[in-house]
Image (spheres, grey):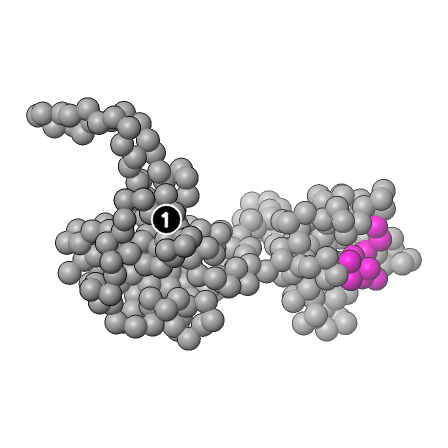
Amino acid sequence: MNHLIVQIKGNNSGLYKVLSNKSIFDLPDDLDNPKIYNTDYKLEDDEWFHIPNFSSTAYCIELLKKPFVSADYDQIALSEYKNMQFLCAYQSGIYLFQKLSPIHMIQRKWFTISNAPVLEENKTIIVINDLPDAIYVKAEDILYFKKLTSISSIFKGVSELYKEATQQETETFLKSSFIKLEDGYNADKVKTANRKRIALAMETFKKFTPKEKKSVSDYIKDYCQNLTFDTKKSNFSIKNEDDLKHLLWGIEQRYYTTPISKEKRVANSVSPI
């Protein structure tokens, strides 16, 4: 049997039943090619990120660790709808989640299209998205999702997958011998997008041998001719966010030349094959 439950915040926090015997979401048919979460990877329309062995992670919620028994949940009180955090549709062993925010609660005049339409006034409706924000398949112990930001309030701690360099890590990276900061640019001016790239670049760079570090420097000089390179001191001048972005793309070897047209390009998203 299918059930819809809701997480409530506040004095009466907990899970409550909303309705039963209804299928809320259609299960997507494109879960067969999931990707391990990567902050710098942009999903195609038919792709999902996934976390295998989800029940053993620190951010798995209690709901998913035990058998689903609808009798465990009281019916939500009318006064508690304003305190909803997320919906969870239980459909034949699959849990489908939707984060709730004020945009999902709409109060308008409306009527359904039918042979006998009835105008409804001052009634609040809850909007159900076409796709759930997360899907947990218990038989596989896999959580599927599209956006980490959409599930971080549901699964506490999962945001640790979002790798972003700390202030200290950013300062340390910008002190690297191959970087020369100019025009007052410093760690305080590095924004979120580049902090994410720094986190990835640090992991990549520390795996390089001295020879590979020299090779990647030559590679960056070849593709990023807008970056000033001091041949004597072997460093790149970084004056702003755009300079840093191109340097970080170079460390990640995002630049390439097409084999036929010989056009130089940069990959906006990469995935190992």
- Pick out the residue farthest to the bottom: 56
Relative placement, left or right, of 14 versus 179 is: left
Residue appearing at x 77%, y 52% in the figure: 187
Residue 168 appears left or right of 93? right
Residue at screen point 44% across, 61% down: 155
Query: Residue 244: x percent and y percent?
Result: 73, 49
- Above or below, 84 against 159 in this view is above
What is the x, y in percent for residue 59? 45, 67
Residue 228 shows up from this direction: no
Q: Which of 67 and 45 is in front in this view?
A: 67
Q: Nearer the viewer, residue 34 or 141?
A: 141
Please check the rendered image and state whether residue 174 is part of the magenta-colored stretch, yes or no: yes
Let me know if residue 185 appears in the view. Answer: yes
Q: Where does the image place residue 238, in percent across and percent down from the top left?
A: 79, 48
Q: In the displayed image of the protein, which residue is found farthest to the right?
A: 232
Residue interval drawn in magenta: 171-181
100 sits left or right of 130 in the view:
right
Q: Residue at x 55, y 55 (%)?
A: 40
Q: Residues within 10 Å of mark 1 (few under 14, many from 20)?
A: many
Residue 64 belongs to magenta span:
no
**Residue at horizontal 65 percent and vertical 67 percent from the top:** 203
Residue 112 falls in which quadrant of the image? top left
Q: What residue type is labelled 1?
A: Met
Residue at the spot of label 1: 84
As drawn, is 67 to the left or to the right of 247?
left
Q: In which quarter of the image is residue 202?
A: bottom right
Nearer to us in this view, 45 or 228: 45
Residue 108 position, x and y percent, is 31, 27
Q: Is mark 1 on a helix, strand or loop?
A: strand
Which image quadrant for residue 216? bottom right
- Location of the N terminus (image quadrant): bottom left
